[in-house]
Image: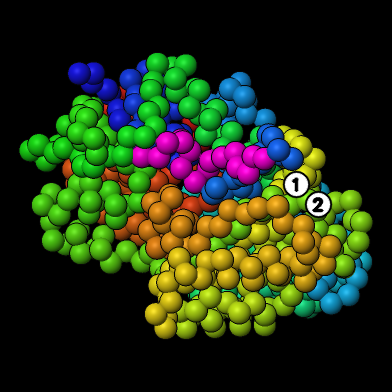
Amino acid sequence: MKKYDALIIGSGHNGLITACYLAKAGMSVCVLERRDTIGGAVCTETMFKSEQNPHGFRMDVGSSVHIMIHQTGIIEELGLTNYGLEYIEMDPIMSYPVPDGKGVIHFYKDLERTLDSIRKVAPEDVENYREFVEFWGRINKGVLKAFMVPPSGKNIVSELMKGQFRDGSMFKKGEQIDGLQKILGSYGSVVKNAFDNPHMQAALTWFAAQSGPLPDQSATGDFVGWQSMLHQSGAKHPKGGSGMLTQAMKKLIEENGGEVIADHPVESIEIEDGKVRGVITEDGSYFEADLIVSNAHVQTTMMKLVGREHLDDSLLTKVKNIQVGNGFGMVIRCAVEELPDYTACPGDPHVHNGMQLLAPSVDYMNRAIGDYHKKLPPEEPAVLAMTFSKIDPEVAKDGNHTLFAWAQWHPYELANGLHWDDIREREADKIYGVVENYAPNMKGKLIDRYIQSPLDIERKHGLLRGNVMHVEMNFDQMFMFRPTPELSQYETPIKNLYLSSASCHPGGGVFGAAGYNAAQIILKKHKRKKLFGAGR
């Protein structure tokens, strides 16, 4: 029986990042994945092969747009482009087709191009947007640094205070109180106060909503403020699909002597005298390791794999009480005959390059949220469309196209005796219908589709209650509170058991910071030579 220095449970991108750093530092590493494909929610599968489409369509089955990871330096440090990873710029990053007339707002990586686009639809907000980007850009330099270290009140305060002196003051003279109010306010109020045009308000509210919290939740101002960072990093999609990121990590691990094994769901973590010894998989196989890193959901890790018998009552209660929420959203992955031709901007050459924000107004979104509070799917869903075949022919080689349509505020737990298996097709029709309303040419152009309801997302990815961020991204579950204060340093009371998933600081999305931070904790703790991140 082979023994490993480190065993990682789950092949999501955070777990693989941890494994990459440990393998590069000389540890013998093994990653165990429960599904038959690796990558967790950063995974691409080929679907819908036919005589007309013999190559099928490359469909992302989780995250698609890569933004945050390009602000961390992880890809460069690991040299992942040496392992087949190639990124395609999404520029404009996102576009907002006007719902009731002509015009489109393109948000480019280049700020001046963005301002030129805003000027055509919302001239009253050109300077408002410039000031918005400048204000939040100063703040987020410190926030990003706080994301890339284990969380503590000291780290947050120190990085924000450094921001007062680094590259000029974080707050200009006289704006400290107003600035703090924005940070502690809701992103809905930040948008409303910053912009006058309803199309700008709808576009920025809908994009901020992708982080999870509702628009009226306090201390979420920076979820829209992070818009400023898009003009630095841009947004990208891997050539061949989102899963090419995790495939590159797999190759790096294997080149450094590690193993990545699919179809091996872990049933339990073996613990002896308060210390991990190994894991037992569902087929009865035993894998021994000096340390174990769980990239699974924190509740799955602690309550199922570790087991209640190894946790004191206080921690068990806190883990049980972590706010997972009642679902997040659902998505349809469509193979289509052509791309949407939006009524607002027919023939626009740029609109398909990035995300397409299909949310007519803030009131429209509030109605969807109202349905969510009633535990009902939205009658009129807000949609974020993505058409990667426009910028990457690799995902649809036979001349057709891919269309992903993500919609939000779909409750996992439904009222009135409804069940997702009974209504998923109906709700998918609603989402596609929104695309048709914006682009009537899409009627009758659907070749096939792959539906992921909140329940489907839970079943496929182990994301409890369909929350793609693992646990809620509210302020009381961020930084040193994520997932609980006792577990916030990526360590557990079980000796040599670590956490690295999006359940940990700084949270979800294709970010990688949780995996990076966990690796640095482990390398320091186990006195291995730290080969990377010395400049952080």
Q: For the point 53% across and 30% down, which residue is it?
A: 247
Q: Are marks 2 and 1 in contact (CB under 8 Å)?
A: yes
Residue 134's place in the image compared with 110, above or below, is below
**According to the image, label 1 marks what residue?**
401
Q: For the point 63% across and 44% down, which residue is it?
A: 48
Per the picture, the main secondary structure of the magenta-coloured stretch is: loop
Q: For the point 70% across and 69% down, which residue is it?
A: 433
The residue closer to the viewer here, 55 or 20, is: 55
**Which segment is the magenta one?**
34-50
Checking the image for residue 154, the label placed there is: none
The residue closer to the viewer here, 312 or 65, is: 65
**According to the image, label 2 marks what residue?**
338
For the view shown, which residue lies furthest in the front direction? 51
Q: CA distance from mark 2 to mark 1?
A: 6 Å
Q: Position of residue 124 (x, y in %)?
A: 86, 74
Which amino acid is tagged 1?
His
Q: For the point 19% across and 33% down, which residue is it?
A: 284
Q: Which quarter of the figure has residue 236? A: top right
Q: Position of residue 213 (x, y in %)?
A: 51, 68
The residue closer to the viewer here, 366 or 491, is: 366
Q: Position of residue 75 (x, y in %)?
A: 58, 32
Residue 40 on the magenta span: yes
Residue 81's place in the image compared with 91, above or below, is above
Residue 247's place in the image compared with 48, above or below, is above
